[in-house]
Amino acid sequence: MLQPGFIEQNKERVLNGLTVRNFKETHLIDEILDLDRKRKGIQVKTDDIQADINRSSKEIGALFQQGKKDEAGEMRAKVADWKTELKTLQEEADDVRKKLEKALLDVPNIPHPSVPPGNTDEDNEVYQAWEGDMPRLYDGSKPHWELAEKYDIFDLKLGVKLTGAGFPVYKGRGARLQRALINFFLDEAEKAGYLEYIPPHMVNEDSARATGQLPDKEGQMYHVTIDDLYLIPTAEVPITNVYRNVILDEKDFPIKMTGYTPCFRREAGSYGKDVRGLNRVHQFDKVEIVRLEHPEKSYAALDEMLKHVGGLLDKLGLPYRILRLCGGDLGFTAALTFDFEVYSAAQEKWLEVSSVSNFENFQSNRLKLRYRDAENKKHLAHTLNGSALALPRIMASIIENFQTPEGIVIPDVLRSYTGFDIIN
């Protein structure tokens, strides 16, 4: 969430950034500034009246001691009028604060200057192209959904029976491969200095709002209405909220966290797109990395995260490229996002497997996540997160890219986890 003071001091930058995002509701900026001016004006009046009340209360006591009961009575009546006025001002202030917060919640983050303009994923910029060899498949190779049926490693029809479309059931060596990937990703995160968490798979409204899922992604989340809880769309939500309403010391940075969770997304509006197999599902497993950083070091941290995710894909032997997302494709809370895409040889297309983002202080303002500097002044921290990695399309790419006439060869780095080197 942007701060009114930042908007006031950087109005032109904010409007230009919203233009890059193709955000149309720019009238909210003037509305926010107007509401903030009203809030400040009410606060000045409130402070003045409260000062008058405090001063007069002392004078009333002195007048009574001097035997000036009539004058004390008149002043007491004046104080009563001030208190009535103060109550009206406080009600007005509450109304203005609510309107201001609602308007601020509807405004996305301002893009980093490097974010290219554009409306759709076709306008995303190739930040790092793949320069190695592409997988060469044998004649008769198949997409992963056909291989899954051939080798009985996951079952989409069974998922429909148990729950509905988009809920795959992994079986046998497919389940083992899934678990191997999770453990490999967690071990690599731990080696890189990330502290592992096993968080809840549901969060309350405050947590969802703090990281920006509400109100922006309300239609994408599964809502348990009786308990007013939300199934998490990513481990980012509970893990980042570990530090909600926390004040850190400057020396605490960097804070590096990781966690594996299932993720739940309704994927509303995705129908009609390529949703075959594991390309788009409603429940999937993912290992997330989250960082809390000093503002001066957050972009160096973002570079480190890119290298970490790229290193995972290198060790798996999967061809990938990195995209810098354009303004129209940028997530609501992000200042800068890089997507990793793995090449699926059987489908002959690139599949997104990770997003790595710097939110700057947008999330931390909602989280009330601050730190004290050497002079004991408080500042908002920067937050970052990345998928390291999301499993469905990694599974799909491994199944497709490593298929041979004899079976699906397991990448070398996973064999100590799976206990086998081929699925046949």
Image: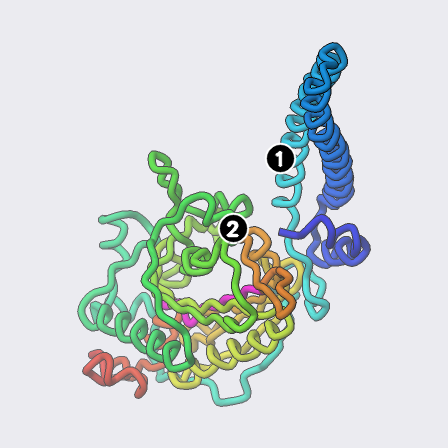
Which quadrant would residue 127 be assigned to in this image? bottom right
Q: Residues within 10 Å of mark 2 (few under 14, many from 20)?
A: many
Question: Residue 256, how many percent across, how many down?
Answer: 45, 71
Question: Residue 213, how many percent across, how many down?
Answer: 50, 50
Main SS, magenta region, reads strand
Total count of labels: 2
For the question of whether residue 88 can be seen, the reply is no
Mark 2 vs mark 1, CA separation in Å:
16 Å
- Please state, as top left, top right, bottom left or bottom right, where the C terminus lies in the image: bottom left
Identified at 39% across, 41% down, the residue is 223
Q: Residues within 10 Å of mark 1 (few under 14, many from 20)?
A: few
The residue under label 1 is 98
Q: Is residue 254 above or below residue 225?
A: below
Which comes sooner in the sequence, label 2 or label 1?
Answer: 1
- Left or right: residue 85 compared with residue 393: right
* Nearest the eye: 310 or 66: 66
- Left or right: residue 298 compared with residue 112: left
* Nearest the eye: 170 or 20: 20
* SS at badge 2: helix
Q: Amino acid at mark 1?
A: Lys
Q: Amino acid at mark 2?
A: Ala
The residue under label 2 is 210
- The boundaries of the magenta stretch are 382-391
* SS at badge 1: helix
- In magenta segment, residue 256: no
Colouring method of the image: rainbow
Identified at 36% across, 75% down, the residue is 185
Identified at 62% across, 39% down, the residue is 102
Which quadrant would residue 325 be assigned to in this image? bottom right
Q: Is residue 339 above or below residue 38?
A: below
Question: Residue 198, how many percent across, how many down?
Answer: 32, 62
